[in-house]
Image: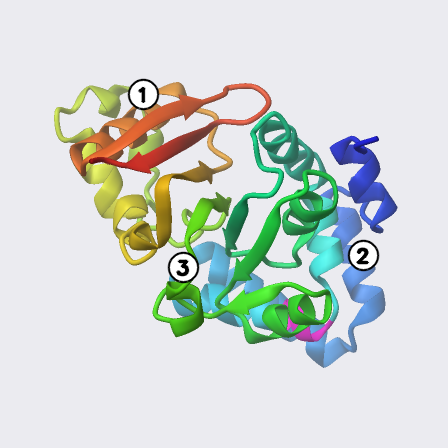
Amino acid sequence: MMASPEDYFRRNGLKPMPWGEVLHAIETRLAPSALETFRRLHRNFIGYPVEHTCRAFYDFAGKHDLLDLLASFRFERLCRIAASLSPLPLRGCSVLELGAGGGHLSGYLREELGADVSVADWCTENLRALETEGFEIFMDAKDAALRRKRLDFILCADSLGEVNADEDSWLREPENAEDPEYADRLEQRYGFVGKLAPWKPLLSRGGSVLLFEPIGLPFFWEGVLASFRESAWKAEILGPDPAWGIVASPGV
């Protein structure tokens, strides 16, 4: 019998934790100098969300065994995404998770939904850990072994949007959604379509991208939908319950 997302994640050592509790737990694991480094890297990533600050933060978290704590802070979010994936026909399908992190969703897909899961991530520490758990790992879309695969699904769960240029939150203001260029500005700031371009050829005929981001604004998702369709993807909005997202397939 398939476990519920909540039961699965709890069984694998996660539990709901507010950020203050996560920080307290991190303080008990890290020496003072390492704790100061963690705080600096986290501050840099939150304040300046670009590739190198993201990579530095998650590499540090992986090296210091903090990914379970960060995932526990996202416990409810992970459950919502997993619940969105559960009804999909994933059994026996080839799925690649981009930005797999600690591999919690990948584990759920493999162990509970019966998918054949491989993973990609920027952070070498994450990939080493995921490889020990039996996942086939890839660094990027240029990997020759990956290019020989044909993927039924590519999962991007709160991974593509972490690096963005929306520091002033222009896209989150409802009145700005009336701008005729809103979808273009969204792509300029988040770059979902551009980030997926190298991965798009790896999808099998009829394959789909499943994109989730922790942004609960209907007009934002209408803009994402328009951006995908303008770039010749077939796309539909998922959500709002259990989680907002997009399912998109390459156009013919």
Q: Within 10 Å of the Cα at label 2, are there few (<14), some (14-19), or many (20+) other Cα atoms?
A: few
Q: Position of residue 127 (x, y in %)?
A: 60, 70
* 233 w.r.t. 24: above or below: above
The reply to whether the C-beta atoms of the residues labelled 3 and 1 are less than 8 Å apart is no
Foreground of the two, 36 or 13: 13
Measuring from the top left, give residue 149's x and y in whole percent: 43, 59
Q: Which residue is mark 3?
A: 48
- Which of the two discs, 1 and 2, labels the residue nearer the N terminus? 2
Please report whichever mark, 3 or 1, sits nearer to the chain's N-terminal start.
3
Q: Is residue 77 something that shows in the picture? A: yes
Indicate the amino acid at tag 1: Pro
Q: For residue 24, which numbered disc appears in the image?
A: 2
Residue 180: quadrant of the picture = top left
**Relative depth, front residue between 46 and 10:** 10
Picture coordinates of residue 81 (x, y %)? 60, 34
Residue at position x 80%, y 40% in the image: 8
SS category of the residue bearing label 3: loop
